[in-house]
Image (spheres, rainbow, N blue to C red):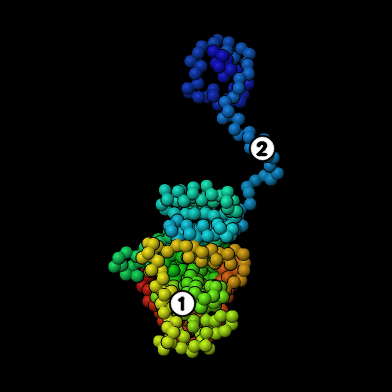
Amino acid sequence: MCLTRYILSPPFLSLYPSLLSLPSFPFLCLPSPCISLFLSLPSFPISFPPALNMASILQKLMTPLVSGNPEPPRNKVTVVGVGQVGMACAVSILLRELADELALVDVMEDKLKGEIMDLQHGSLFLKTSKIVAGKDYSVTANSRIVVVTAGVRQQEGESRLNLVQRNVNIFKHIVPQIIKHSPNCIIIVVSNPVDVLTYVTWKLSGLPKHRVIGSGTNLDSARFRYLMADKLGIHTTSFNGWILGEHGDTSVPVWSGANVAGINLQTLNPDIGTDADQENWKETHKQVVDSAYEVITLKGYTNWAIGLSVADLTESLIRNMNRIHPVSTMVKGMYGVKDEVYLSLPCVLNAGGVASVINMTLTDNEIGQLKQSADTLWGIQKDLTDV
């Protein structure tokens, strides 16, 4: 009876007038005199349940000084695909403190939910204030950099062309969604075969070529520098060398430019990198080409080195550093390449994407290998459909 008196009291009904419109309101079945009698009774104080006071905690805690929607993030990075490579990219970007917001997207909702929860639980140890995830690409809105790692793996006995075509079909869904929500972004393509899929992304996106970049031979060059430096007994950063062309079997080692402290190794050994080289430095490039296969044989996949490589590229873009990286870019018209292909050349990266391409002085043999690399890629691209 006491609760009835309170519920029917004018103060309560003034707060919740909609109760009277509910079909299940418990006193609508009472005769009118009874309702009048109850309404005439004085109300008495009653404590609200704790849940009704929860909203006031935030109001009591702080006083807002700015109204309206918050400012959009300035350095938001999205990673598409939360497999081993995607998560290595995400963690590397987080640890280098490159993003004020990180978004993850994948079609595998349970895996995505698990990964985002795991990262969010460690947010105390990170400087990125917001980490979000979703199957819907709306979570990627206003991204400055979008890293694409999604794709299918090559099946046993599957041709390279068929693998590429299957990935093209996936990219036909991914790329338009990226552009819809982040039309001003720069896209870094990591999915393999990276050079062909970077070309596909450029065609599907409608973006200018300098804003579609492939991770290319940035990792190949890192492997080359590590292996060469290790043989010379020096730190990786102290050896300067480049791998250009395709990220794969037809990559081109630039032996003519390999140097330590400005000393060109070719002046010390004119045969370096050739079959006539008695020291067999050529084996180092073979190790670069085979290293991914070796790692996959040992642990099932590669992820950490490519994750660190992508974070390095992201840093140059986010921080407008004008650093030079061997990344996959449109090379038509360079070094005699006549077709629209993406392959790796030394590029200056800044906040706008690829600002310029370095015109390296290559030997005739190196230029010939670069053209062969371009021909290999074009041989695949020309047969693609729906691009």
The location of residue 73, given as percent across then percent down, is: 60, 54
Upstream in sequence: badge 1 or badge 2? 2
| Residue 236 to residue 9: above or below | below
The location of residue 55, given as percent across then percent down, is: 60, 34
State how far apart marks 1 and 2 are (Cα): 58 Å
At mark 1, the secondary structure is loop
Residue 382 is at least partly visible in this image: no
Q: Which residue is mark 2?
A: 61
The amino acid type found where label 2 is placed reads Leu
Q: Residue furthest left?
A: 157
Residue located 62% across and 24% down the image: 14
Residue 53 is at least partly visible in this image: yes
Residue located 49% across and 81% down the image: 254
Q: Which mark is residue 168?
A: none
- Left or right? Give the position of 247 relative to 236: left
* Number of numbered callouts drawn: 2
Q: Which mark is residue 245?
A: 1
Q: Could you say which is closer to the camera, residue 127 or residue 299? A: 299
Q: Residue 53 sits in which quadrant?
A: top right
Structural crowding at the residue carrying mark 1, measured as other residues with C-alpha within 10 Å and reported as few (<14), some (14–19) or many (≥20): many
Q: Could you say which is closer to the camera, residue 245 or residue 271? A: 271
